[in-house]
Image (cartoon, helix red, strand yellow):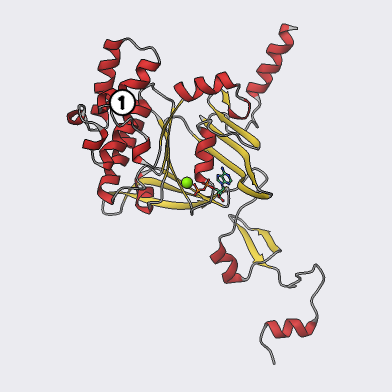
Amino acid sequence: MQHTVVDELGARLAAPEEFGREALVVCDAVVRIFRTGGVEVQALQGLDLLVGRGEMIAVVGASGSGKSTLLRILSAADAPSAGTVRVGRWDLGALSARDRVTYRRTVVGTVRQQTARNLVPYLTARQNVALPLTLAGRPHRTARTRVDELLELVGLADARDRRPAGLSGGEQQRVAIAVALANGPQVLLADEPTGELDTTTGQQVFEALRAAQREAGTTVVVVTHDPAVSGQVERTVAIRDGRTSTEVLRRAHVGTDGAHGFVAEEYAVMDRAGRVQVPREYREALDLTRRVRLALEDDHVAVRPDTTRADTGTAPAPERRRRRHGAA
Ligand code: ADP
Ligand code: MG
């Protein structure tokens, strides 16, 4: 009996086809549907995403594309309607109420856009950062050292005795990052943490997130509106209509003149069924509609318009075809 269990487990762990086996965060065909007053909104429509341990990624996308929904699911504040979400050994689609509390306290840290909502207003920076440690039952002395280390990490050692009202918006967000890191989470989730800040202050907040990744080894997922931000992370994932549509990878490279720099390359994301979204500009430029022709070439796949122009599935009438091409 026991053998069977062990063998099955062994087989499952060894299954080479398991999606994202190595990744810390795995989203596999995640769907989230909201129903309000008879109206159904599909906030996530089969989203796939892998994030490696210790990686920092930016998530970008138009308003309403599903970014916050994704983050809320990753922080276990919400649950997927379908699909699989896994963070480390935690299956977020099937958390008990008790596991949810443990997960939220120990595995993830979150930073919200609204600066005012991240901190307790009547506590100093130090007391705010100490709060989660006290709740977790950390002895006072070790907690104190940790609080100072964390405030140092986000560049706010000097501000430790100030209350939120005495801190700028950017400083408040950096304290919020220290609070989120207090219990040593594996993943830090930040939903538009620089949304209410100007560019310079936003940069400092971003620098604090990078410090969390670099020095604490935390995996960071940050949602942002700021296009300049994608220039600062190795990978930017774009969400469109509740799915990951493109990824921009940024790589160090050495130019012909020997200068060190970075190149950013955009990739389309292919889902597990082989679906790729063709950007609207491309579709419009070549009039790609419901059907396209695919051809396998030596080193690429060609996508060509449907020359029969058959919207209904049958060949079009000759007159219609002439009209379309403007022949009189
Ligand atoms: P983003 O953060 O990218 O702006 P959201 O994840 O907040 O997008 O929202 C995605 C879609 O889901 C939107 O159409 C939004 O109106 C809808 N939505 C989000 N949360 C809820 C909710 N609690 N109830 C109903 N609809 C929601
Ligand atoms: Mg949002």
Residue occupying the far right of the picture: 314
Query: Crowdedness of circle 1 by 10 Å Cα count: few (<14), some, many (20+)?
Result: many
Q: Is residue 327 above or below residue 251?
A: below
Residue 60: image location, x then y, percent: 46, 49
Q: Is residue 308 above or below residue 108?
A: below
Which residue in the protein does label 1 denote?
128
Q: Is residue 97 left or right of residue 292?
A: left
User: What residue is drawn where x is 30% and y is 40%?
Assistant: 205
Question: 90 or 97: nearer the eye?
Answer: 97
Residue 189: image location, x then y, percent: 43, 35
User: What residue is drawn where x is 54% and y is 66%?
Assistant: 281
Question: 87 or 63: nearer the eye?
Answer: 63
Question: 222 or 311: nearer the eye?
Answer: 222
Q: Kindly state the secondary structure of the residue where label 1 is placed.
A: helix
User: What residue is drawn where x is 63% and y is 26%?
Assistant: 94
Q: Is residue 131 left or right of residue 43?
A: left
Residue occupying the far top of the picture: 2
For badge 1, the amino acid type reads: Asn
One can see residue 105 in this view: yes
Total numbered labels placed on residues in the image: 1
Residue 278: image location, x then y, percent: 59, 59
Q: Is residue 106 above or below residue 81?
A: above
Residue occupying the far left of the picture: 158
